[in-house]
Image (cartoon, grey):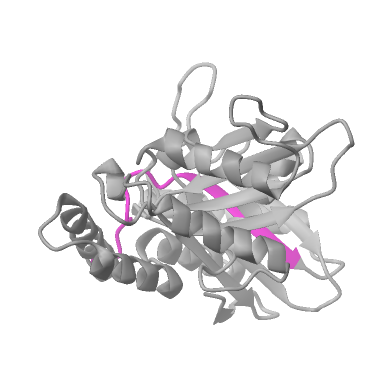
């Protein structure tokens, strides 16, 4: 096994088995916030125990290890073909070792070849930058939370949502309300305002690469992010829909230019098993540093 493939295998293992520290801190804060003796508190305690067991045993946090989505930022000249080949081999080995469930099926036949490699699996997004660094981020996004994602076209008469930030707020909160704890809440939202139907959804998933404790550089969006979390947590949906004070752990909102005829709000929902990790690679393909 070459060093790059070995590094990507360790990235997959750690992403599958270990929650990032910023997410774990948010979960522990949510546990403290829930009323003692409630089903919500019990659900958060089970989640915390699950996190500890997965890390100690180096086993997947959730049986649904999800869609495998790589984000690679590298310099001009990075051999993307070789990188993709190494990533696919790492996915095959990770599946054989049990870090990933045999989770990718042919959409027409339902056949599962047991490798997790096929059209669209894994998904790799490459981005060139001037820095010599190669940074690789990975999201494992479960099917349950993917199912409760939503996209709105504004204006929306039913929600009384116009083409402004208040209209975006109404659409985002409606997505939370419609989920009703499905998708293994408490959840984290990645949102994109603008773009087209495809780029909006893709940009909303990129928001999930941000840390939960970061600050949006756009003051209006920063206020909206905080307001969405605060308001959602007053809806009484709670962990797994059992009621309580923790419906969302975070909301991250980005924006893309749009056509005058379109105004989309795209919402990607992430479950509490927020499997997101990243590495900076050394020139030889080894791991130089962890990014989260």
Number of marks present in the image shown = 0
Answer with left or right where residue 42 lies relative to residue 181. Answer: left
- Please provide percent x and percent y for residue 81: 75, 53
Is residue 88 something that shows in the picture?
no
The residue sitting at the front extreme is 160
Instruction: Give the residues in magenta.
Output: 57-73
Look at 35% across and 41% down and name the residue there. Answer: 181
Look at 37% across and 37% down and name the residue there. Answer: 180
Identify which residue, 223 or 197, lies in the foreground.
223
- Please provide percent x and percent y for residue 206: 65, 55
Identify which residue, 136 or 200, lies in the foreground.
200
> Would you place residue 66 above or below residue 218 in this image?
above
> Would you place residue 107 above or below residue 140 in this image?
above
Look at 52% across and 74% down and name the residue there. Answer: 292
Is residue 161 something that shows in the picture?
yes
The residue sitting at the top extreme is 109
The residue sitting at the left extreme is 37
Quadrant of the image occupied by residue 134? bottom right
| Residue 99 on the magenta span | no
Answer with left or right where residue 163 lies relative to residue 46. Answer: right
- Please provide percent x and percent y for residue 147: 47, 33
Answer with left or right where residue 144 lies relative to residue 192. Answer: left
């Amino acid at each position: 096994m070459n060093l790059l493939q070995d590094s990507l295998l360790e990235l997959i293992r750690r992403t599958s088995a270990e929650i990032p520290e910023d997410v774990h801190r948010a979960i522990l804060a949510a546990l403290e916030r829930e009323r003692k003796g409630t089903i919500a508190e019990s659900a958060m305690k089970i989640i915390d125990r699950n996190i500890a067991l997965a890390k100690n045993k180096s086993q997947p946090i959730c049986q649904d290890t999800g869609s495998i989505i790589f984000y690679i930022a590298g310099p001009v000249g990075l051999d993307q073909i070789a990188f993709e080949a190494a990533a696919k081999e790492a996915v095959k080995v990770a599946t054989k070792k049990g870090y990933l469930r045999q989770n990718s099926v042919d959409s027409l036949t339902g056949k599962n070849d047991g490798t997790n490699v096929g059209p669209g699996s894994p998904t790799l997004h490459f981005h060139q930058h001037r820095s010599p660094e190669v940074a690789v981020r990975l999201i494992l996004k479960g099917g349950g939370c993917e199912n409760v994602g939503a996209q709105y076209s504004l204006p929306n008469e039913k929600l009384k949502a116009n083409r402004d930030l208040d209209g975006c707020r109404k659409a985002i909160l409606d997505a939370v309300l419609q989920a009703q704890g499905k998708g293994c809440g408490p959840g984290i939202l990645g949102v994109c305002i603008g773009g087209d139907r495809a780029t909006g959804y893709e940009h909303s998933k990129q928001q999930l690469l941000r840390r939960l404790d970061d600050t949006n550089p756009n003051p209006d969006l920063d206020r909206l992010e905080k307001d969405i979390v605060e308001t959602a947590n007053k809806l009484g949906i709670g962990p797994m829909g059992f009621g309580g004070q923790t419906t969302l752990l975070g909301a991250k909102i980005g924006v893309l230019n749009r056509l005058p005829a379109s105004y989309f709000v795209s919402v990607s929902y992430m479950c509490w098993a927020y499997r997101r990790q990243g590495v900076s690679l050394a020139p030889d393909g080894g791991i130089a540093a962890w990014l989260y």
